[in-house]
Structure formats: structure tokens, C-alpha cells
Amino acid sequence: MPEAKIGVIGGSGLYEMEGLEVKERISIDTPFGDPSDQYILGSLEGIETAFLPRHGAGHFILPSEINFRANVYGMKKLGVEWIISVSAVGSMREDIYPGDIVIPDQFFDRTKGRPNTFFGDGIVAHVPFADPVCPVLSDVLFNAGKEIGTKIHKGGTYICMEGPQFSTRAESRIYRQWGVDIIGMTNIPEAKLAREAEICYATIALATDFDCWHESEEDVKIDAVLEIMNKNINTAKSIIKKAVTMIPEKRDCICTDALSILTPKEHIPEATKKNLDIIISKHM
């Protein structure tokens, strides 16, 4: 199995990574089914990198249909230690304009029924999730954005809704009262699973519109969203190219030893041990 240190999960509009010197495209089998697409492995700025389009190349997978467990498991199987996520979001604040970049540091989960853990089937585990993104990787992404001169915001709460519908006006106003900063459909349970897999995870959130709370703006229209998204996808690619050169060689953060397994190993079914070997082996 080939390996990569850094993984990039591309969101809406990001289906390929310019500058990635492609070496191979591989399909990965996982105990949780098929990932969204083939993993594209290659060298980005001299760093071994794996790229995966979250919605599949051609954008044919709804947010609720994404096999998040398979996607993250596949990254772990490739040896990925850092996942850079790219995600289109709506702005919930006056000062986050369409076209701005946000590096969120908190998530609020409003999804329904998405499998959000690798565990169960005879094994119980827990991870701390008070600070759900890697502080080191978040700093790298923010600093990379500053270096390329884009308008970028450090920190903020990303509320993850189910979709595929956008918010009602009532929902949008209530979310504003809750103090959230951006809204999207795809970073949960992705961030939870990355933490369980002890992979460093952070998000480049691309603000494509003001959510419908903004009375002076038109209601969210997909054509307008796509126009803005196409502009800041190029910015995201530039941030990623800069960031991969800034990621530390060794990890020293909360993500590296986050997993605690409560079930004694002699009580864990053999099939479960086999399925989760790449995630739990160091704790056995």
C-alpha cells in the first residue's frame, strides 16, 4: 500500500488538485464500504499527499450520502497524519463576506442519522472533542492564508446542518442567536472520525454567501453560490500548496494520542479487532 503524510478532502468545487504530481489513483476497500472516490496520490510541493473529492469527481454524492467513515478510514490506511478539509459554507456574520476564508475552531452538530463513530460491535472507546480541530494545523492554514494575502478569519463556530436544503429564515435567525459564525453540511462527522483515528484535522471554509438571515441580500441561490465558490476554490488551492510546506515533520498536539479504549482487549470480538486494526493497534 502506498503512503502519504498529508490528506486533502476536497469539497464542493474542488475535485482535483492542481500542482499535485500524480503518481497513482487507487481504490481502497474498507470495513465500512466504499469511499467517495479513488484516492489520488502524488507529490505536492515535494510532499507526499493524498487527495479525495468528498462528493466524488463530478459531484454525485449528497452530503447525507457521504461515507465519512470509509473516507477517513482510507486516509488512515494510507498513513495520513494530517487532513486538510475544504468546505463551502454560508456566512452568519456581517463581517464574513462571500469570498472570505474562515478557519473554524468549533463545530455544532445539527445532522441527523449519520454514522459518526468507528466503534461499537463489541468495543467501546471515547475521545476528547472539546477542541475539535488540530490547533497546530489550524495555525498552519491561517498563516498560509495570510502569506498569500487573502482575507481570512481565524476561529469561529461551524454549524453543520443535514441538507441538502438550505436553512429556512427562522432557522437561520435562531442559529445567529446561538452565536455561530458559518454554516455548512459536511464537516460533521468527518472531524469526529478524524479525531477517533488520531489524525490531525482542520478546515478551510469558503464563504460563498450570506445565509438567508441577511434581509438586505437576496435569498441563497445556487447560481450565485457557484460563482463565488469558483473564485475562492483557487484561493483554497493556493493555501493548501503553501500549507503543506509549513506542516511540522513531527506531531505534538492533542490529536496524536486522543483515543481511549474502555473494553478489555480479550473481550473485543476478533472480527472487530481485525476491522479496526489500523485505528486501535497501538492501544492493544
Image: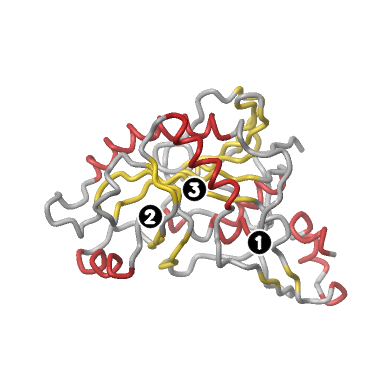
Contact (CB < 8 A) between labels 3 and 1? no
Element carrying mark 1: helix
1 left or right of 171 in image? right
Element carrying mark 2: strand
Instruction: Tell me the amino acid under the disc marked 2.
Output: Gly
272 left or right of 180 in image? right
- Residue drawn at (44%, 49%) of the image: 154
Contact (CB < 8 A) between labels 2 and 1? no
Kindly indicate the quadrant of the structure image that contains residue 232: top left
- Residue drawn at (79%, 58%) of the image: 277
Contact (CB < 8 A) between labels 2 and 3? no
Which residue carries the number 3 mark? 203
| Other-residue count near label 2 (Cα within 10 Å), few / some / many at <14 / 14–19 / ≥20 | many
Which residue carries the number 1 mark? 196
Instruction: Tell me the amino acid under the disc marked 1.
Output: Glu
Front position among marks 3 and 1: 3
Answer above or below: position of 271 versus 42. below
At which x and y percent is residue 170? Answer: 21, 69
Nearer the observer, 155 or 256: 155
Distance (Cα) linking label 3 and label 1: 17 Å
Residue 184 marker: 2
